[in-house]
Image (cartoon, rainbow, N blue to C red):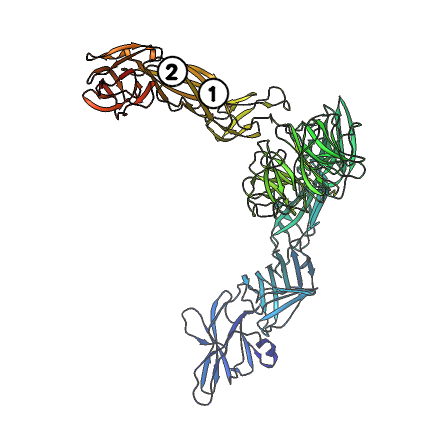
Amino acid sequence: MRRALKPALAAALAAITVPFLAHAAFGDDTATAPTAQVFPTRTGIGVTWNDVEASSYRVERKEGNADWGNVSGPLSAETASWVDDIIAPGTTASYRVVATTDAEAATSTPVTATRNTTTPAVGDIDRLALDVDPGSTWPHDESADAVTVSAPADGSRTLSAGTMKVRLPAFISGPGNYTLTPSELEFTQGDHSCTASGILSVTAVAYTGTLALDTFAAGLRMYDCDGNPLRRGIDLRYHSTFGYQALSVTPEQYDYGKVKYSVAADASFTVKNTGTDPVRIDGVSLTHVSFPFRFNPDVPHDCRQTLQPAATCTVSVQFLPMSIGPESDTLTIKDSTSLERHTVALTGYGIDVAAAQNVAVQSTYNGHTVNWRSQQTAGGTAVRGYNLHKYLNGAETVQWFPVKESTDDFVFVEPRTEPGTEYGVSLVNEVGEGPVSPRLPVPRAIEQVVVSQGEPDSRDLAAADQFGHVVPFPPDPNSVKAKQAVTTSPDGQSLAYVSGTTERALWTQRVTQGDIGVPVKLWTSTVPVTHLAWSPDGTRIAFQAPENGTPCVFLIAATGGTPVKVACQVSSPSWTTDARTLVVSDHRSTPSRLATIAAAPGGARVTTLAETAEVADGRPVRASADGRYVAFGDGSTVRLAGTTERRSPSLDSEVRAISWAGAERIVALTASGRVYQLGVNGGDPYMLNELAREPNTQRGDVTWQHPRVTIEPTAEVMGPNISIPFDTSAFPAGTKFTCEVKGSFVPAKPCTSPFTGTELRSGKYQVIIGGAYRDITVDADGPVARMTGPNYQSSVAAAATLTVSGTDPNGVASYDVQYRRATSAGDYGAFVQPWTKTTATSMTLAVAAGYEYCVSVRATDKLGNVGQWSAERCFSRPLDDRSLSLATTGWTRATGGTFYYGTTTQTTAYGKALTRTVQGKRFFLVATRCPTCGSVAVYAGNRYLATVNLAYPTTHKQVLLGLPVQSTLFSGTLKLVSASTGKLVQIDGLAVGRT
């Protein structure tokens, strides 16, 4: 048994850091329990404890179920450790330290240890060997001998060699695996240091009785050093007979560089055993089992099972890129070293020739553009440039375009298109020229945006395609230079523009796909002409021009002639869909407002648009093709009339010109010369795209050109059966069109010109033909006609003069007149229509005696609407007196030219009666009135009606005397009875009416 004295072990005592356990104290002396710790030695089991200022110590041992026994005997107060060298190898025992102070004792907590079955040998191998996964600048691989070990301090001791230091727990109980925490493990290499977690695998360990490290052999795997997840393995040897395993793989990482697609590049990696013991190779693998990295099939690796010290083997890996761009993989050698594996990071970059991207051909009516994406790198290398391949008539020409720094697309502009032209683009990089893109023909343009360039040298026109590329109109010796204001004909086949060089003139010029016609001068002006607008029916062009400094709007025929002034103090004309009214900024009221005015001299205001913002002179105003919207420029925005909120996003500068592209797109030109396309779908206008990106402050106007249907001039008001002529010459033969009357029950249907619709009701409609719109007014109501004569209810005349009249907003074209008649005792017969579509308003009708005639009229207006039959006007012609029956004697008949039909029936006696069977409500007695005439009583059946006094100061023949009108139709015998004596009662006839 050996004991360590306190002076010699002062430093070692500090290694014991387990908290003390205290005993209760009696009297003046108090004993404190020490803390014990065991450690292996080559001769037994060592026990060490901390000084508790005891007067003496003893070590007790317990084996199995035996009692505690004193194995050390009394130890002095200066003793701090003791070695049990009598315990048998392989035996496990528990130990405790008893500290005594006078009569008191305090006992440590028991600790248990097992003596090694074999005595660890002390050798001459000292080594700290660090092996680190590649990819870290620190820690890095290092191997050093001449290991030194510190004394225990604060529960730890440090092993040092080379630039490395490893701090471990001061005592390790024996061989085995130990999990270490960052508080137990610290690693230092050079100027860097970190705490880490790890696993310590101990093969052999022993300490001396003075607590120094006697021999040590272990492997340490560290994790998360300094936040770096790479694994690190350290073999630790001190005075050891055990060798160590170490392996190196060179190079530790490898970059194959740029390798052409589908071409293999080889690299070899040397695996070497740099330790003292053989290393077992458990496997060689790549992370990915397929391309682009693979083991060289022609050079299999020779790293088999065990690699002896200083021996090497070789692994060959190929990089065979099957795609373009960076690739990576990891070569892994699984082995028996403490690191368990060694890896090599593999990188490479696949390259190849590349294809040009986003090749497109866009066309305008007469030119085209070829554009493709600008790339600085492609196929894994720098781009050198592009070849533009043009194919025409079996020949190919190539034009070179070097790479540019900008990422803006390449744009090749050709003002004139030759039929049959095709294009392809190839990209050239450091590998070579890539494939030519598929041939693209120049498509037929169906629309273009025309801008007046405003350039000082030409001020000519240019067209923008849908990609925003501007294509100048092709050179034309007939072209008129200095084009300013511009607009499109409704069929999209012609342009109207204003020139302003030596003279200001208004021109039209046919511009179609592949053809530009000769300009036609319409009119020469002495003042600026702006804001052109071509009418939807193609017949007139509206424009603005000043008169004595005041803005005025004029109209001129599309074929030329003298302009007609519409009105002054109005500006920015734009046609509405009825082709009869203009939307203008009307300055005749304050503040200026958008209004519709008649496109006629005087410019009478029709409506004022609901808009609170003042629309000043010069602002562009344009009505949409379908009439739903009126757009106008308001600063840098485009607004829609009718609300203060419906406006576009702000554009780059003030809006200079507007054109509608159909019914749901707006083309806007700003003061910077940029052209934008805005969408409209019922809300705020929104940005679609930019059509001319390059700024040009000289650009003055813009218009949209597209083949369209032209609805020809239509009547201001139409009848219910409409006929709408339209022109489709802008389209290829055989193009089909659909017609629709919006707001009616007429369904949309295929149609040809003229489009007809029937039985429309009165009202306003919109006719839509192939995307062209026309507002029409339908009058389906016939005229109101009435009979104005004759103005009597009964007459003895043999003919009646009929007069008629009628009223209609569109004028009366003709009349139809009919009548029916009834006998004195019968119903009406059938209608007779002696006059049909007569323009006369007076006609003569022959009437027969004894009949009532009822006449009516209807009229037809100039639109063909037929009115209703008017109310009847009825009149009767009397029966002759000879049609009356002599109910009594006393009557005589006389003749004479003054009597009705030349006869009369008379009496001077009282109570003499005449009768007639009748049906009617209204009766007239034809009689003579004279100074000596008497009276006659009238009875309807036996009911007395009235007595008619025939006396009169002068004599009158054939006098019609009305009897009381009956409330209901009387059917029976009407009796006339003389009611005077000695006075003449002379009856000449009786008229009967059923009304």
Is residue 296 visible to us here? no
CA gap between label 1 and label 2 equals 21 Å
Q: Kindly identify which residue carries mark 1.
A: 841
Task: Specify whether residue 673 is in view.
Answer: yes
Crowding at label 1, few (<14), some or many (≥20) Cα neighbours within 10 Å?
some
Task: Please tell me whether residue 678 is drawn above or below residue 437 in the rendered image.
Answer: below
Task: Left or right? Give the position of 975 relative to 278.
Answer: left
Q: Mark 1 or mark 2, which has the lower sequence index?
A: 2
Left or right of 854 in this view: 484: right
Q: Secondary structure at mark 1?
A: loop
- Mark 2: which secondary structure? loop
What amino acid does circle 1 point to?
Thr
Percent position of residue 296, x then y:
67, 39
Report which residue position mark 2 lands on: 797
In terms of image quadrants, where is residue 378?
top right
- The spot of residue 487 in percent (x, y) is 68, 33
Q: Nearer the viewer, mark 1 or mark 2?
A: 2
